[in-house]
Image: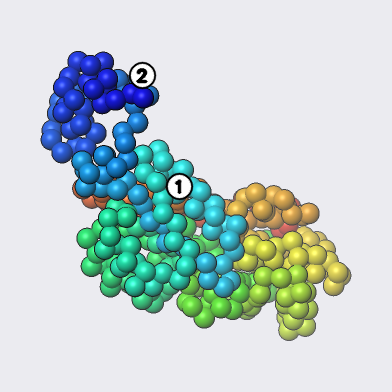
Amino acid sequence: MVKITDVARHAGVSPSTVSYALSGKRPISEETRQRVEEAIRELGYRPHAGARALASSRSNVLALVIPLRAGIHVPVVMQFAVSVVTTARKHDHDVLLLTQEEGEDGLRRVADTALVDALIVMDVQLREPRLPLLRSLERPSVLIGFPADSEGLTCIDLDFKAAGEACVEHLARLGHRVVALVGSPPEVYVRQTAFAQRVVQGFTAAADRSGLSSSVHPCEASPAAARLVAEQLLREHPALTGVVVHNEPLLEPLIVAFERLGLRVPGDLSVTAICPDELAESVRVPVTSVALPSAEVGERAVELLMKKLGGSAVPEATLLPPRLTERASTAPRNA
């Protein structure tokens, strides 16, 4: 096993200098730091986690808070988690995954111990009850999502309002005049989950600006629910020619349901979605979609947290602009 003394000998410095280079507790010259880092790489030295934590008063562990509540699409959530874990490892940090309903008590329990250095919080609500605690904690945090009041917090996410607008604007350019949003399960809206609410805001605002007739339909994530909402849409809006889907498990079942009701996609009905690119590309009719950049959001959330841990200033708000890719599911409205 390579020891710190081996690194010191290889770099031509004292063991204490190697320790300072690892912990950052005392300043050393850039030239010396580079020699130490080169020796660490060449010898494959891995500092003992317990000793490193004692030396730096840091655990090198981040908490990722993902309450797996009803209505959450776990595969997409796990894409964010994988990105956070992968990026954290690049910074020599591990990730403690908290999947239960972590309210104030749960967050305080973790933050008041030496278990973690910082927190990443997902499934943010517009009226987020955890905000007073997050603002008061000594440990830094980053939210993936934007509450209604984000002052004093560090938040990052896709601009879901702009994503909803982009889908509607695309349909409007194709001449569609009656559009509907098939959204997240009802409980997601009851909780006022921020990303779902932002999509509705963008969808409605863009439809109003373009003079389109529009409606919003929360929907359970099941094939049976897809059939019911398709039937409801055609019954209540017979002139419907454009649909935006913000509910990943419904994408394929909804297209199948419309086809069984006699509508061709995109001949009679254009479909857009907000979802991962790989899902949009895998449907029988590849779907025009705004990409869900889970890998980029997770990576940048960790990078923001690393800067905060290092004492650097970071922007309070990071909104990723939507990227819409046209595929086979949308076409000009039939006259």
Residue in the image at 53% along x and 71% along y: 69
Provide residue 222's location: percent of width, then percent of height.
71, 70
**Visible residue check, residue 235:** yes
Residue in the image at 74% along x and 54% along y: 283
Which dot, 2 or 1, sits closer to the camera? 2
- Judge by depth and name the residue closer to the eye, 232 or 132: 132
Quadrant of the image occupied by residue 63? bottom left
- Residue 57 sits above or below residue 74 on the image: above
Residue 286 placement, left or right of 164: right
Q: Amino acid at mark 2?
A: Glu
Q: Which residue is mark 2?
A: 42
Q: Are marks 2 and 1 in contact (CB under 8 Å)?
A: no
Quadrant showing the C terminus: bottom right
Quadrant of the image occupied by residue 56? top left
Q: Amino acid at mark 1?
A: Val
State the SS at label 2. Answer: helix
Residue in the image at 32% along x and 46% along y: 60
Q: Which mark is residue 85?
A: 1
Q: Which mark is residue 149?
A: none
Quadrant showing the N terminus: top left
**Visible residue check, residue 173:** no
- Residue 22 sits above or below residue 44 on the image: below
Q: Which residue appears farthest toward the front when viewing the image? A: 1
| Sequence-first disc among 2 and 1 | 2
